[in-house]
Amino acid sequence: MDQSVAIQETLAEGEHCIIAVQGVLCEGDSRQSRLLGLVRHRLEHGGQEHALFLYTHRRMAITGDDVSLDQIVPISQDFTLKEVFPEGELYILGSDVTVQLDTAELSLIFQLPFGSHTRMFLQEVARAYPGLDSAPQDPQFLWLSRYGCTEPQLESPTPGAWNSAPGGSNCDNSRPNGKALLVDPSSRGQDKPENLLTRQTKSKSEITDMVRSSTITISDKAHILTMQRFGLRDTIIKSRLVQKEEDYTYIQNFRFFVGTYNVNGQSPKEGLRPWLSHGIQAPDVYCVGFQELDLSKEAFFFHDTPKEEEWFKAVSEGLHPDAKYAKVKLIRLVGIMLLLYVKQEHAAYISEVEAETVGTGIMGRMGNKGGVAIRFQFHNTSICVVNSHLAAHTEEFERRNQDYKDICSRMQFCQVDPSLPPLTISRHDVILWLGDLNYRIEELDVEKVKKLIEEKAFQTLYAYDQLKIQVAAKTVFEGFTEGELTFQPTYKYDTGSDDWDTSEKCRAPAWCDRILWKGKNITQLSYQSHMALKTSDHKPVSSVFDIGVKVINEELYRKTLEEIVRSLDKMENANIPSVSLSKREFYFQNVKYMQLQVESFKIHNGQVPCQFEFISKPDEESYCKQWLNANPSRGFLLPDSDIEIELELFVNKTTATKLNSGEDKIEDILVLHLDRGKDYFLSVSGNYLPSCFGSPIHTLCYMREPILDLPPEVISELTLMPLQTEDDGSRLETPMDIPKELWMMVDYLYRNAVQQEDLFQQPGLRLEFEHIRDCLDTGMIDNLSASNHSVAEALLLFLESLPEPVICNSAYHNCLECAGNYPASKQVISTLPTFHKNVFNYLMAFLQELLKNSAKNHLDENILASIFGSLLLRNPAGDQKLEMTEKKKAQEFIHQFLCNPL
């Protein structure tokens, strides 16, 4: 996931986040998560300067609201960044890269995730360093050559805002008014390194990605770090080696252990060897996944959890005693964690390790549901391991199907060759998918299910399994295989026992926990549950596989490589590449808010290998407008080959308002550039259907008719109408007190959902959201037919899309100051423009009604304040992002109105 987008939203005009990486700030025993962004600032006289922006953040840093600026470190002459190897530290392949950042005034240690994205980040930082001509001879730049950055092209350093102070600056003084990048030299006496570090350690610690124990052994990763950026010749060679792979590889079986365990928020209470190593020979590879690692609100909203280290240590101690293992990677999204280990002797054959996460929770952001994945190359076979936790409840199988599809479409891994598009899950030789998939038994009552289990009639019961039914219908896991279920359902048990659920809900038993696979040369040796473990209301599941991996015969490889190089030497590289495009004009008809449209075309290459890329037009940062994306946007073509390019058009909260007002139109020109060749121009046009989503509150109050029934010029006039504190009577139409669209959604929820469990916490269905949007935009509310969760999520998306939040930007800081003082807070709300004040009071009254039914819907003031705090009270546009403590003040402000009479 590209987290630079979240950083970009926090930046002032003239600033651009080039690349961002998530890391861990290490100081003593403290581990604090940080998002590091490399930011470029263009100066008025034409020069430029760079700085590292350090942010605290939520795990899912998708928007600017998810990050808080902590520190700015200018990249000036005294700036150094080098890889360090702490004495006595055990390093294994795929482990984090530890780097030390030094300036005249501070020294920081970061652990960055191993992989190509970190490599690209460090390359870009190297290029940003002023006057790097002699750097390779300087020991402080040892790490540059390891990352292929020995030939940066840089301008001379330009004195400017960031270079005015050599050290970092606390964000309180670094960006006055949020408009400039100034680091006030006068603050240097106040912000000494020891003061900065003291403030940092006051933040709540996060558990490090890299916990090591004596059972984890050393392996060399240097050969991976020295891998250079691919050129055209390298890319051609690599492509032809792939084509001739069978000429120099053979198949060798390796044993894989795959395990999944939903631990229900518990800490380890028993050893894991009965699950991980009892009764099997030592596996070559371990893939171990957990769900519901931590169910606390802190983990859900802020990612903090001590459970990661607890379960990591429990797994490390439970691995097979007859072998030594190296941890390749650990990846976690809230409560979903995946661990990958290999035997010591195989570590040298692991490469191209990448890990990614996809959250599918409410609004597509929360990580309480979703997936994590690790992909890697083992010898010459690409392998992807996915651990997912899909939507709960028996009736929500369509939501589970959607979660699966979202994980497949959104999970993307960077490649070693940065000119190539990201890899998706499906583009691997072997895919292992494990997790709490949450598919249930349908049509049978609880007693019938238990009777069939008692009779061990598992195949009879399996006929009613939702996953079996959905796979047969080809709605999910197409092409995957699952072994025969010869064990009883793994959910739901009374914790600490083997007894079925005796709680009030008395959940029907189900095979929630599953393991599937896809690929060639895979043999399943076992598939079982482990009843001996009783920590959770689930039982762990394991499967052991023999997987045929392509191993390289070095002699045959050299011969094949020599043949390819000789053939390549004969090519006439002076030829100019040329391609033909199947289509150059694209029209997107009736584009709607948050509804993806895709147009595709093919590029056919001539007789010369070529690299292509969509490039920016003069004076533009990106190759296309924000609502458009080309996939892939760059790539490589062998002679006489084709590639399909998809143009994806998607309007969201960032782009909707200007399309509603007519300030922007569905019009753009794309420039497709060939390396050493010419440029091709593609025309994109279309029409956008205005929506209440992305429209200002006061605009909607003046729209007594549905927005799609109004002429474009009226919509434009009302959208561009300035926000007025009071109606001056100049409008022909008498406005409504609140937007009718807001009333429609809240009224629907009031009538149908006040007792709905998990309201505002469980996502809805995408197709239902589109139906809700259409009903609101056409005014056909009588046709509204959707689940309560879909309407609730539509309400949140509506509030998120408002260009001016319910509590106006001008009142933001006053609200933070008044948090905890209810009379003063009410006074601030009374000063809001009438329409905004009406909407706030209306929403608070509705949320208070929900709380009256908390015994049924399980909502409380803290949950609602957390969800609505960032929607109703947003940081003003262009202002710096605030500390997490101040975000909690925003939640405290909303909390007051939920607990007191309005």
Image (spheres, rainbow, N blue to C red):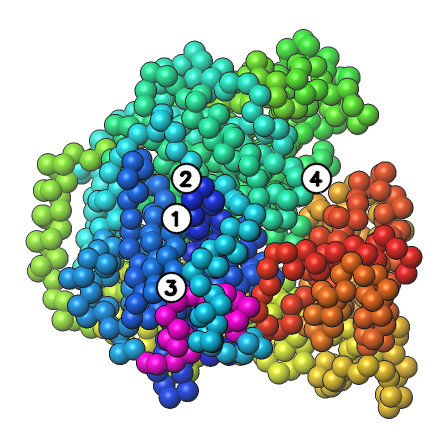
Sequence-earlier tag: 1 or 2: 1
Q: CA distance from mark 3 to mark 1?
A: 20 Å
Circle 1 packing at 10 Å, graded few (<14), some (14-19), many (20+), is many
Q: Please report the bounds of the magenta region as a residue range.
A: 158-175
Disc 3: which residue? 105
Is residue 479 among the parts visible in the rendering?
Answer: no
Give the amino acid at mark 2.
Met
Disc 2: which residue? 210
**Residue at the front extreme, as displayed:** 189
Image spot of residue 248 (x, y percent): 17, 37
Q: CA distance from mark 1 to mark 2?
A: 9 Å
Residue at 33 percent across and 71 percent down: it is 76
Disc 4: which residue? 396
Give the amino acid at mark 4.
Glu
Query: Are discs 1 and 2 less than 8 Å apart at CB?
Result: yes
Sequence-earlier tag: 4 or 1: 1
Circle 2 packing at 10 Å, graded few (<14), some (14-19), many (20+), is some
Q: Nearer the viewer, residue 755 or 445?
A: 755
> Which of the image's four quarters has the C terminus?
bottom right
- Name the quadrant containing residue 475: top right
* 172 magenta-colored: yes
**Residue at the top extreme, as displayed:** 455
Give the amino acid at mark 3.
Glu
